Amino acid sequence: MPDETEILIGFVLFSGFTGLDLIGPHEILARLGAKCVLVANNLEPVATPHGVRVLPDLTFSTCPQLHVLVVPGGPGQEQAMYNEELISFVARQSAKSRWTASVCTGALLLARAGLLMQRHATTHWLAMDELHRLGAIPTNKRVVWEDPVVTAAGVSAGIDMALQLASALAGQQAAQRIQLAIEYDPEPPFDAGSPDKAPKEVVDHLRSTSRFARQEV
Amino acid sequence: MPDETEILIGFVLFSGFTGLDLIGPHEILARLGAKCVLVANNLEPVATPHGVRVLPDLTFSTCPQLHVLVVPGGPGQEQAMYNEELISFVARQSAKSRWTASVCTGALLLARAGLLMQRHATTHWLAMDELHRLGAIPTNKRVVWEDPVVTAAGVSAGIDMALQLASALAGQQAAQRIQLAIEYDPEPPFDAGSPDKAPKEVVDHLRSTSRFARQEV
């Protein structure tokens, strides 16, 4: 692995990606001094489901080989499964990258690209069955390392994953500096961040309204 | 306060804002169903220090009255202190908004706009002295409520603040649904997220290299 300032880290963008899936890891990995680029089908703005429009830096066809690839999830993941340029980019890059990582339902895109067959992985808790259907071994952990693939659970888990990646790339002290710089000493106001902990009615509501539930009816 | 779907929440953008200061709260507050808009001097892309380019939705002069205003921080805060359009926008909006909130060194912009004189507030741990110099009463908490102003500590604290705001806007169960939807059940790989907890050499390194330290020499 080259010096941190020569590491190239790419983040895949697609319409309907979840903003925090991208920016959580980006905030951490960019602070390593690594060069971070956003990669999409073309250079037009790409919007999150909530209307934040982000400009890509490179296209899938012009992006050089990356050292680390990060694939976010989000409602747009469903359409992205049929985005052949995106899927072949992930497959091609991952063949030579040191790590290929996903956040949330980005894991389903890694599975679609053939990276998770009979391999341990995690995703958003509502998408675990779908991950299984795609050939992976769903693993109920916040971050799953199955070198060279690293998968994180839903949305905010990308922050924890990126700190682990930062440590793997540049050492524990570099990762701790970043953690302190972003003052990541979480104090969630409720203990409702996983289906094991949240009130039953909260879990039931999300289960019954999720796009994964809707697919089954 | 109107129904959630009629709530208008604005996020201030300026060159050099920290990406996670924006996207952490945005990810949470947008999931309320509130309309979220990004507001800047003009409609040109605005870049984070790490080169993520985001498109504003509205300008300071065309943005209607907001119910909630969120001001991120970041290295660009220093220049933004002299951005008269931005500062007067914050002052004008906050006079009628239900809440005005900041993340990280966004609190220094609130102070510059006259919102924190002799009021309790927090900011990034490295900026506490600067917050004091600007007339506020620095308060070592992750989120400080001094109605109608809410301030959060460094970067990632915006997530905790936004969940509290979501609860205040739409009730505890709505906030818990969002927490579960973003699977916010943090597992930081190190216990280095505050200067009280991080190894001394990590704290010393950040202290000696921070822009606030550099200002003093």
Image: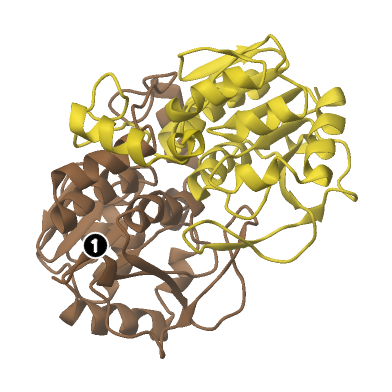
Chain colours: A yellow, B brown
Q: Is residue A157 above or below residue A40?
A: above
Q: Chain of mark 1?
A: B
Q: Residue at x 48, y 71 (%)?
A: B79
Q: Residue at x 49, y 58 (%)?
A: B75
Q: Quadrant of residue B109?
A: bottom left
Question: Mark 1 belongs to which amino acid?
Answer: Arg
Neighbours of disc 1 within 10 Å: few (<14), some (14-19), many (20+): few
Q: Is residue B82 left or right of residue A91?
A: left
- Closest to the observer, B212 or B69: B69
Where is residue B35 shown, x and y percent of the image? Answer: 35, 68
Where is residue A157 shown, x and y percent of the image? Answer: 46, 30
Q: Is residue B75 left or right of residue B196?
A: right
- Closest to the observer, A55 or B85: A55
Residue holding disc 1: B133
Tag 1 secondary structure? helix
Please indicate, yes or no, whether residue A171 appears anywhere in the rendered image.
no
Q: Quadrant of the N terminus of chain A?
A: top right
Q: Is residue B1 above or below residue B102?
A: below
Q: Is residue B21 left or right of residue A133?
A: left
